[in-house]
Image (cartoon, grey):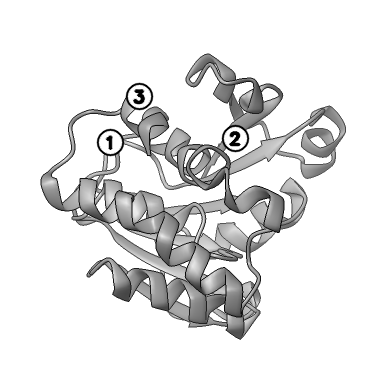
Amino acid sequence: MDIILKYFSDFTPEQLEQFGQLESLYKEWNEKINVISRKDIDGLYEKHVLHSLSIAAAFEFQDGAAIVDLGTGGGFPGIPLAIFFPQVQFHLVDSIAKKLKVVEGVAEGIGLKNVTTQHSRVEEIKNRKFDFVVSRAVAPLKDLWAWSKPLLKKSSLTPLPPSLICLKGGDLHQEIQESGTRPRMMEIHDIFSEAFFKEKFILQVSR
């Protein structure tokens, strides 16, 4: 938890409590349904929560915006972002139902009111449009953009254009080339100094 407070300070007492409860809730749920590897659960705040919050450090989402988290897994980046932006609506989607059971359990456990879930493949989401799509290491950028584009609004009431914002790692040169997109790239290590964030990036592809 201290690692979160190293970089962010402007939290309400409720947000502080919610972030503080994540470790015990994830440990409890992970015993039943393994969504975080055993070696990573002890580094939850650095490897999962702070990693997710790199998006919050780079982007200011307007109140009332609608965001879909594709392939949310155990709720990353969606759950930490939903705590950070309580007035933004987050729709967390995954094709594996048991993972969403963890997401729902954690969201309920900390009293998140701005999170909904959907057990679905991305391609099956119909009749809904979002201001942003977020995702973490789910698929190649080419696929992520193909799935995201139909879900994004044509224009946004927010200052930011409707975009895919995803967390990626490693050498992305070929992946970006194959995607046919020209993303804006930000190195997370420029935001958070921990060694874990070296060669980790935020990519933004706008409509």
Residue 153: quarter of image: bottom left
Q: In this figure, which residue is indicated by the disc labeled 1?
A: 159
Q: In this figure, which residue is indicated by the disc labeled 3?
A: 7
Q: Residue at x 44, y 37 (%)?
A: 55
Q: Residues within 10 Å of mark 3 (few under 14, many from 20)?
A: some
Secondary structure of the residue carrying numbered label 1: loop
Q: Residue at x 23, y 44 (%)?
A: 62
Q: In this figure, which residue is indicated by the disc labeled 2?
A: 203
Identify residue type, mark 3: Tyr
- Residue 70's spot in the image, x, y percent? 57, 63
Question: Disc 1 to disc 2, how far (Cα)?
Answer: 18 Å
Residue 61: quarter of image: top left
Q: In front of the other: label 1 or label 2? A: 2
Question: Disc 1 to disc 3, how far (Cα)?
Answer: 24 Å
Q: In front of the other: label 1 or label 3? A: 3
9 or 207: nearer the eye?
9
90 or 34: nearer the eye?
34
Q: Earlier in the sequence, mark 3 or mark 2?
A: 3
Asked whether, in this view, residue 162 is left or right of residue 199, the answer is left
- Residue 8's spot in the image, x, y percent? 29, 28
Question: In the rendering, which numbered label is found on residue 114?
Answer: none
Asked whether, in this view, residue 102 is left or right of residue 174, the answer is left
